[in-house]
Image (tube, rainbow, N blue to C red):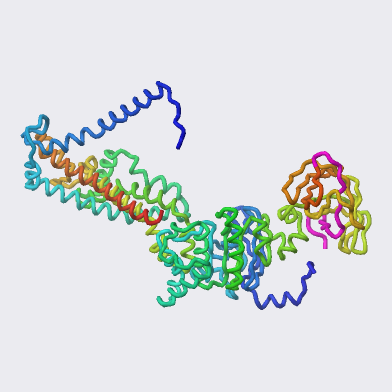
Amino acid sequence: MLFIHSSSSEVLRMTDIAVDLKGVTLTYGAFVAVKDVDLKIDKGSFVTLLGPSGCGKTTILRSIAGLVTPTSGEIVVAGRLINDVPIYKRNIGLVFQNYALFPHKTVADNIAFGLKYRDVPKADIERKVKRALDMVRLPGVEKKLPSQLSGGQQQRIALARAIVIEPDVLLLDEPLSALDAHLREEMRTELKIIQREVGITTIFVTHDQEEALAMSDRIVVMNHGLIEQNGTPEDVYRTPATKFVASFLGQSNLMTGTVVQAGNGSARITLDNGASIEAKAPASLKAGSKVTVIVRAQRLEVGKKAANGANKLKGRIAATSYLGGTAIYAIDAEGMKLQANTIIDDQVFREGEAVDIAFAPSDCVLLGEDDRRLV
Amino acid sequence: MQPRQAEDASGVWGWRAVKIVTILVYIFMFAPILVTVILSFNASMFGGFPMTGVSLQWYGKLFQNEAVLRAFKTSIWIALLTAAVCTVIGVMAAIALTRHEFRGKQWMNTLVILPALVPETILGVGLLLLMKWANQPRSYLLLVLGHIMLALPFVVLVVQARLIGIKRVYEEAALSLGANRFNTFREVTLPLLMPAIVAAVLLVFTISFDNITASLFWRPPGVETMPTQILAMLKISISPEINALGTLMIVITVGLPLLGGAIARILSGNRQ
């Protein structure tokens, strides 16, 4: 079910798209920040643009906001082509990493700012500000200045200010990265709850994979101005579409080898260190192809009785990070470096110990020579 | 409590020497000012020590001196006009230089501060020669334009420094909320810029009010500014009147920036 790209859901989406990017390219001189990106974002969904810095995720966000103009391509928000609409005439909510609350205005004036320019009557403004503050769970701080609030509180006000104008789309530019770790997790949940309550289409930019996995309906993984993969968090995590996605999200083991036999949805592969394994494979795979086998570090079993049909490798522990409930092992498997993140149920292996490693053929994802998943 | 650091004897003496030198430097810097202020209250006919009594007579004389009052008024008007024009142009220039990209920006950036680097005497002569070539007489207009040229770089520098400190996200946030560029400037940039603008106004006022070198070249015949008037009076004698005048000028040129600093602190205190 992870591979479903059914036409019926495509049709459904066509009618309910909040943001539609068509062939958006953005260049700064010779530097290509975003390369011919096509992206459709469903109404009411929470979509994360994930990638390392400089991957183009922020540029896409800023081009939707109207802070930068695409070199080519079309940006359609709520059915309206907005390429030539200035930022202040786009109906867009923007939340920044450093809150960007107006320091000389009270919380109430900050939240009311956007309403003022939408000709909302005074009495309504007051009511809406109050409701927005209730929504972000900070009632009664109307008269305070931003500097009198904590970082987390300021970010809630920034969120209230962006949502109160009922924008077509809410754009969040790494809004949690200025907060400390504990608060960040709390705000993550809070943000998601608020987004659900309001039902607002949200595009979230981050380089933090945990945030992306925890909050998103869909994750768009980007690198070098290109979309590497667009899918649900499970989709992206379990079946990475490219080598980049596999290595950027979570810990993966990449093993190269050659297919010796293929068919019936499975393939026998000889790894470069000589070991032979079985992997789930698409029907198109042919014997003789060079492949990269990806197995998540969490899917490697260390020192346990292997289940029937599992692949077995021999290895030696190179390093152990003991984390209480879990352990991370660096393993040297006959010349191949592997990482295993395992739950400890009886024994912790120490450096130098010989161990058996096992993983199921169904936990393997195969990449072709172009580093893309074979389908 | 921090643990007391063990200090050896040379360390103690070192600190004492630093303290003494500091005090001496301060005395050196403030003695002339102090002498002027004290002697302005001297009852003696001569503008120097010794003191023969305390009196306000020189202040009285000063306020009856038509030439001095005229020069004072001239200087105030020129300084006010210079401050107003410089602030408007300077703020606009600073915004252009920090917030917009255009060809030759680097050059503009350097050129705009050039008048602050070139010796005033040279600027004075230069502008005068230019006027002569254009066949224009020396006039109030020339004097004010000259002062504007001298003071403008300082406005640009002060406002630019502050603008760089104002994060663009404030403006971007305002734009995204529906304020157009003008409203964004009025509601967000300008209030955040206010401390720098107040500082710039006062700085320019002081620069213009104090200027003598360039004013000597540019003033129309028969017109005196405050500093040129003092110079003219000094040519005749060191009258105690000058001490009184000096004291008033100190009050104005020191008091104004202090006042401005206080205003700026109050303005920015709201948002720290």
Q: Nearer the viewer, residue B151 or A216?
A: A216
Q: Residue at x 73, y 61 (%)?
A: A236
Q: How many marks?
A: 0
User: Does A182 appear above or below A108?
Assistant: above
Q: Quadrant of the N terminus of chain B?
A: top left
User: Does A193 appear above or below B271?
Assistant: below
Q: Nearer the viewer, residue A237 or A50?
A: A237
User: Does B23 appear above or below B230?
Assistant: above
* Percent x, y of residue B18: 35, 27
Magenta highlight on residue B38? no
* Percent x, y of residue A75: 60, 68
* Percent x, y of residue A104: 40, 60
Q: Nearer the viewer, residue A139 or B243?
A: A139
Residue at far top of view: B9
**Residue A76 visible to the viewer:** no
**Residue B35 visible to the viewer:** yes
Q: Residues in magenta?
A: A350-375
Residue A127 appears in which quarter of the rendering?
bottom left
Magenta highlight on residue A358? yes
Q: Nearer the viewer, residue A26 or B25?
A: B25
Q: Residue at x 44, y 31 (%)?
A: B4
Q: Residue at x 72, y 54 (%)?
A: A250
* Percent x, y of residue B137: 19, 49
